[in-house]
């Protein structure tokens, strides 16, 4: 499998003594060399650093919420990327279907970047904020596709994706040669392949491009984008990925993006539960939570995820209003990862136990809460 990789401008490094460095134009790509040379010519760098004595100091300013200013490429720089890649031009109409926690933030970033965004959401009131920013709301997914050459999809689960893509008034009904669909939802490989086949049969192009990241990275354009499928469409969509993410990779055949996302989220779920258990073990052993966070941040296990969720535990951010990654979506991803493990005959013992913990928490009515709401459930065990 050939891997093609783009490192976008907004990458953040995490260190025990926090430093935030943001490369404004750092790309690497293995092929073709001509586009690599064009993109590399755009390189320039800027950085800044800050210090804190907090036990959670290994978190960057942006992840803590202290840095509200988003770092974005100028429109002229994106224009250069378009010229190099033949991608979606500034000011083009771009469809966006699905305005949940992630989708809304991604669509807002596209609208603010100068694209003319046409939106649809099952709950139409969720379109209102985008409309106030200048977007246009459509009555059906088919209407979005009919008005736009490229449409981004960001839905909750496989069932929603199949319904919106193949159901009445759905995406497929408006597909004709030249129409392109970029599905950034988290689904299984079989679902991606099913939708891909239906779109391709009508002359359209399809790319799966699930994202690694939650609410804050989506708001800040810091997502990692996992593309697979139509390689030409991947290249065409690069200017959009530049707005929505800090890095994108091309992983080859359809289904590989879905598989990679499930592997990553499986690890994220396990990390969350072991982090919670570690907090409990510390406190019940007579150790202080803040000292544990301090030690964790100074060593090899330093992670922005542990810091964000450590803050959530400290502030008891367990209610649905505090959600950045819904527990029901994490459990869905774990279920799909376990199914993939069965398919390829890979034992996933830790993932299985993690899934059971989330199922137990959901049985207590916490499915719409952030996944860190598993912590009080674990603490009571």
Image (cartoon, rainbow, N blue to C red):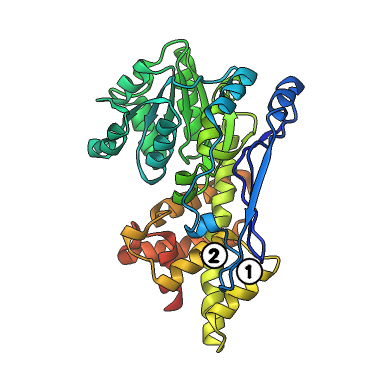
Q: Position of residue 48 (x, y in %)?
A: 63, 53
Q: Position of residue 247 (x, y in %)?
A: 61, 39
Mark 2 to mark 1 CA distance (whole Å): 8 Å
Q: Quadrant of residue 119?
A: top left
Query: Marks 2 and 1: CB-CB under 8 Å?
Result: yes
**Secondary structure state at the residue bearing disc 1:** helix
Judge from the rendering whether residue 35 lies leftward or rightward of residue 132; answer left or right.
Answer: right
The one nearer the camera, 349 or 5, is 5
The one nearer the camera, 110 or 99, is 110
User: Going 38% across and 57% down the picture, which residue do you hit?
Assistant: 323
User: Going 43% across and 54% down the picture, which residue do you hit?
Assistant: 325
Residue 296 position (above or below residue 110) = below
Q: Position of residue 75 (x, y in %)?
A: 52, 27
Q: Is residue 51 visible?
A: yes
- 10 Å crowding of disc 1: few (<14), some (14-19), many (20+): many
Residue 229 position (above or below residue 290) = above
Count of marks placed on residues: 2
The one nearer the camera, 233 or 296, is 296
Residue assigned mark 2: 307
Q: Residue furthest top?
A: 177
Quadrant (top left, top right, bottom left, bottom right) of the C terminus: bottom left
Quadrant (top left, top right, bottom left, bottom right) of the N terminus: top right
Q: Position of residue 219 (x, y in %)?
A: 45, 45
Residue assigned mark 1: 297
Residue 358, labelled with which disc? Answer: none
């Amino acid at each position: 499998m050939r891997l093609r990789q783009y490192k976008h401008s907004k990458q953040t490094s995490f260190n025990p003594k926090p430093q935030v460095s943001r490369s404004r134009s750092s790309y690497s790509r293995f092929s073709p060399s001509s586009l690599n040379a064009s993109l590399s010519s755009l390189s320039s760098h800027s950085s800044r650093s800050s210090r804190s004595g907090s036990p959670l100091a290994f978190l960057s300013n942006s992840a803590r919420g202290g840095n509200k200013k988003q770092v974005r490429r100028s429109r002229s720089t994106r224009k250069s990327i378009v010229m190099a890649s033949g991608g979606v031009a500034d000011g083009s109409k771009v469809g966006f279907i699905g305005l949940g926690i992630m989708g809304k933030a991604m669509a807002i970033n596209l609208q603010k970047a100068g694209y003319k965004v046409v939106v649809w959401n099952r709950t139409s009131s969720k379109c209102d904020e985008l409309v106030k920013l200048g977007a246009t709301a459509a009555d059906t997914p088919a209407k979005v596709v009919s008005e736009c050459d490229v449409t981004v999809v960001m839905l909750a689960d496989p069932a929603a994706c199949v319904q919106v893509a193949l159901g009445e008034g759905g995406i497929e009904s408006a597909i004709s040669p030249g129409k392109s669909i970029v599905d950034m939802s988290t689904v299984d490989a079989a679902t991606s392949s099913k939708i891909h086949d239906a779109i391709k049969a009508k002359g359209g192009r399809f790319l799966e491009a699930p994202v690694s990241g939650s609410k804050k990275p989506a708001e800040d354009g810091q997502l990692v984008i996992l593309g697979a499928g139509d390689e030409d469409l991947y290249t065409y969509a690069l200017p959009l990925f530049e707005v929505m993410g800090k890095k994108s990779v091309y992983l080859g055949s359809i289904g590989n993006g879905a598989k990679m996302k499930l592997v990553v989220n499986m690890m994220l779920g396990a990390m969350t539960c072991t982090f919670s258990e570690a907090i409990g073990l510390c406190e019940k052993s007579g150790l202080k939570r803040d000292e544990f966070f301090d030690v964790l941040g100074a060593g090899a296990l330093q992670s922005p995820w542990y810091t964000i969720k450590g803050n959530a535990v400290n502030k008891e951010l367990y209610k649905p209003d505090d959600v950045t990654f819904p527990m029901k979506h994490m459990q869905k991803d774990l279920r799909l990862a376990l199914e993939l493990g069965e398919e390829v005959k890979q034992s996933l013992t830790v993932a299985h136990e993690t899934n059971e913990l989330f199922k137990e928490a959901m049985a207590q009515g916490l499915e719409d809460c952030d996944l860190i709401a598993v912590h009080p459930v674990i603490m009571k065990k």
